[in-house]
Structures are given as C-alpha cells and as structure tokens.
Image (cartoon, helix red, strand yellow):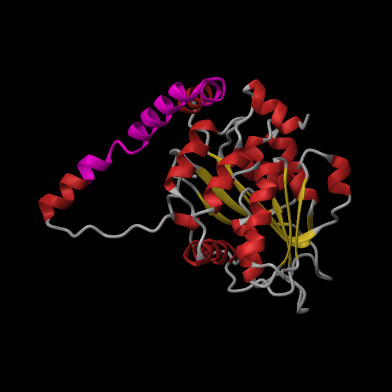
Amino acid sequence: MDDNLLQIRRGDRFAFGRNWNAFVDLVDEGRIESAADSLRMALGAEDLAGRTFLDVGCGSGLFSLAAHRMGARVHSFDFDPEAVESALRLRRVFAPDATWTIEQGSILDGDYLARLGTFDLVYAWGVLHHTGAMWRAFDAAVELVAPGGLLFVALYNDQGRQSRIWTAVKRRYNRSGPAVRGALIAGSSAYIYRAWPLLEIGRLLTGRPRTAVTRARGMSRWHDMIDWVGGHPFEVSKPEQVIARAHAHDLGLLHLKTCGGGLGCNEYVLRRPGGSADPDKPAESVDDLSHLGAARAQPAQGHSR
C-alpha cells in the first residue's frame, strides 16, 4: 500500500491531494493570474524566462502553472499521488504542450532528490511544515538551489500555546468521522472569522460600500479552511529560527512577509551565494538572477494559508 494512503488511513496524515483535486475544478484564468502576481511580488520580477523552477510539494499545481506562464522550465513533485493527479489535470487543461515535468516524490527521499540536480528557483510554499520533519526538509530544499539561485519558502508561524491547540484540533480531525470533522471546521471558521460581524456593523454604520474581495494567491477560502483544520503533520517556526537556519547555510534574506505574530504563514525569499566570479557582487551575465528578489520594504502582515 502507498505510504501516503497508509498514513491517511491511520489518521496520521491529512488527505492533502484529495482537497487539491476538489480545488482544481475552480481554477480559471483569474486564479492563475493571481498566483502569478504573488510570484512577481515576492520575487521582484515580471518574468522567469530561461529559469528553472522546482515546485516542492506542488499540491494542485497552480503555482507550477503560474511559473510556466512566466517563462520558467518547471519540475513539480508531491508525496501525495492525488496531488500529482491534480497537477496533471491542470496541465492537461491549461498547458498541454508545456515543458513541465510532474511526478511523485518526497523532499525527505535523498535518493529521489539526488536525481533532480539543482534549480534557479526552488518553491516550497506551505509544504515543509507538513512533512513531519520540517528542518530536515528545509535543509534538503536548500541543497536543491543552484549557486546564485533562490529559495521561496513559507512556514507556519509559531503562536506558542495556540499552535499546540491547533495541533490537537488537526489530530482530532484526521482521526474522526464526518460529523466531528464538520463540527471542527464550523468551530474553526467561527473562531478565525470572529471579527467579521463587528467589521460588517462598522461598514453599515459608516455607510461604506461592500467591496469585492479577491482571494490572495488565487486560492479558495473553503479549501484553505479544510487544509488548515485538517493539515497534519503540522510544525511551526518563528522568523528568527528560519533566518538563523538560513544563515547557517549561508543564505541571504531578500524578502520577508510575516503574519504579524498571528495565524498563518511567514514567507521568505532566500538567496544562495555564488553564480558569479565575485561572490560579493551580482553576476553580470544574462544567466544570473540578480534581477530577481530585490530587497525592498516589507509589509507588516501576511495572510493565512
């Protein structure tokens, strides 16, 4: 039996791929463009022409598709075979002739990683903290970054006691039947969006019109909620821990977007040294990545997964 399926049946792992398969039905050009916009904003680049892009734990494949649309040569992998199928579905519909490889693999499988080589951009958004070995997965992802390349990673924020409570919720979700799962989703939604009624009252009192909200990164609020409540294994980190780990690998921090100490992911773009004759200066050849990930002012808050 597939190891992923065995863990799901034991209640030790959330069925991430099943959730992504449901989400793929909602993907349209608007969501693809939103995903591409999030890459442009974090990387400080309008296109990825001629670059190689590795999507670690590709999930639905939405960001692999966005990177392909931006000109990258894409390789995607996921531990969950249903997630692999989701990405394959997306490619069939939106990019049937793409230079885009999709396969099953694990960031914790050294033999598999050794066959991949290195990439200009390694993308691991909201993935490494679901492996059950977050720091080992982080170290493995670093080794996949080519000299002068970028690692774009997002990891759940450590909220202390609240994170421990969420861990218990996630374990209960995966070891329960439909009724309990529904109750956990309802209760979690009520907690996360508890400020909405007051905000709506304030809008009505001030006469402000209701504005349309576009979901960040092209995602779905409903599928994100299921992913959040059920997403186990689950590990968290503080920005200072991630930055210290990056520095231990001699990675430089180019972009940081935090969730202001709250619930959600902190987002990092890290650069591996090299790729030029002088490691202290950006390369001048057309193949370097000095135009990507330019340092810039960082927003105080991020967004939930």
Quarter of the image with the N terminus in it: top right
Q: Is residue 117 above or below residue 82?
A: below
Q: Quadrant of residue 73?
A: bottom right
Nearer the observer, 292 or 24: 24
Residue 9 in the magenta stretch? The answer is no
**Residue name at image x 52 percent, y 53 percent:** 25
Q: Is residue 142 above or below residue 289?
A: above
Residue 240 on image: x %, y %: 58, 41
Judge whether residue 156 can be spotted in this image: yes
The region drawn magenta spans 170-199
User: Is 208 situated left or right of 246 in this image?
Assistant: left
Judge whether residue 249 can be spotted in this image: no
Q: Quadrant of residue 42?
A: bottom right
User: Is 187 situated left or right of 2 in this image?
Assistant: left
Nearer the observer, 293 or 211: 211
Q: Is residue 162 above or below residue 114?
A: above
Nearer the observer, 179 or 33: 179
How many labels were placed on the picture? 0
Residue 174 in the magenta stretch? The answer is yes
Residue 174 on image: x %, y %: 56, 25
User: Is 270 situated left or right of 161 in this image?
Assistant: right
